[in-house]
Amino acid sequence: MTVHPSLQNYADAWTHSIEAIAALVGPLAEGDWNRRTPCPGWSVRDVVSHVIGMECEMLGDPRPIHTLPRDLYHVKDEFSRYMEMQVDVRRHHTSPEMTAELEYTIIRRNRQLRNENRAPDAVVRAPLGKEQTLEVAMQMRAFDVWVHEQDLRAALDEPGDLDSPGAQVARDTLLAALPKVVAKKAGAPRNSAVVFDVHGPVEFMRTVRVDAEGRGTVDGAPSLGPAVTLALDWETYVRLACGRVRAAAVADRIKVDGDQDLADAILREFAVTR
């Protein structure tokens, strides 16, 4: 059997992005694996190690037994320690070791997807020993792999795939986080609206509405009198939302109309992943 039809778009997006990663890193010289990426604290090798490690966890492989060094400045909490384990254990792996493990992991995951017959609401393991549905797990793997593909492209100066299937998954995943960013974290006033006008390879306009109880929702209907409108390109939106850059560094790529203080608060809280 194949993956459930409602999960096929996540499988397709994952496949497209992870094959792009394999193509990007396959020809790299040993020194190129040490290039810094926009992902804080991680090199090209580290990003690929993370991807391999997370896919191995989807396969049900046991996590490595490993003690992290104490001087990793980007490891600040339990979640980052969890993620770092799969990375640090591979930090001294050579280029051939990295590409071989990546290729083998892709083969195994492709086989798993071809044989996947669980329902979307089947419960699978999540980071930190938690649980999630298979649908959420596949969505997050498609999203994560695309974001890290972009990290690698930035490090290797190989732009592309900003409108790929993974980009569409990333759009939906990041949009779902907007109400919390605007209503809760940035503290937008009750009975207000904030418009996001995004252009480029992926284009959309969305309105986050904050109701009388302070709850936020997002929809595609325009607002006649928004408190603030933020216009920016898709690549900048992704870099901000994924914590790859601060708003001050890309201020020239963001147009603000309306309440500047609210816009600043939103941009300050815009990162929803790392």
Image (cartoon, helix red, strand yellow):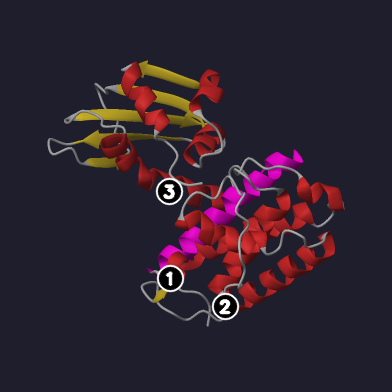
| Above or below, comparing residue 116 to residue 201 in the picture | below
Task: Say above or below: 137 vs 175.
Answer: below
Disc 1 crowd, CA 10 A, few/some/many (<14, 14-19, 20+)? few
**Which residue in the protein does label 3 denote?**
172
Asked if 80 appears above or below 230 in the picture, the reply is below
For residue 129, the mark is: 1
Residue identified by numbered label 2: 62
| In the image, residue 28 above or below residue 222 | below
Residue stretch in magenta: 131-160
**Any part of residue 15 in sight:** no
Rate crowding at label 3 as few (under 14), some (14 to 19) or many (20 or more) other CA atoms within 10 Å: few
Task: Please tell me which residue lies in front, 100 or 106.
Answer: 100
Q: Secondary structure at mark 1?
A: helix
Pick the front one: 191 or 128: 128
* Amino acid, disc 2: Pro
Is residue 77 found inside the magenta-colored segment of the image?
no
* Circles 2 and 3 in contact, beta carbons < 8 Å: no
What's the CA distance linking mark 3 and mark 1?
26 Å
Name which residue lies at 52% across and 61% down: 82
Q: Earlier in the sequence, mark 2 or mark 3?
A: 2
Q: Residue at x 85, y 53 (%)?
A: 30
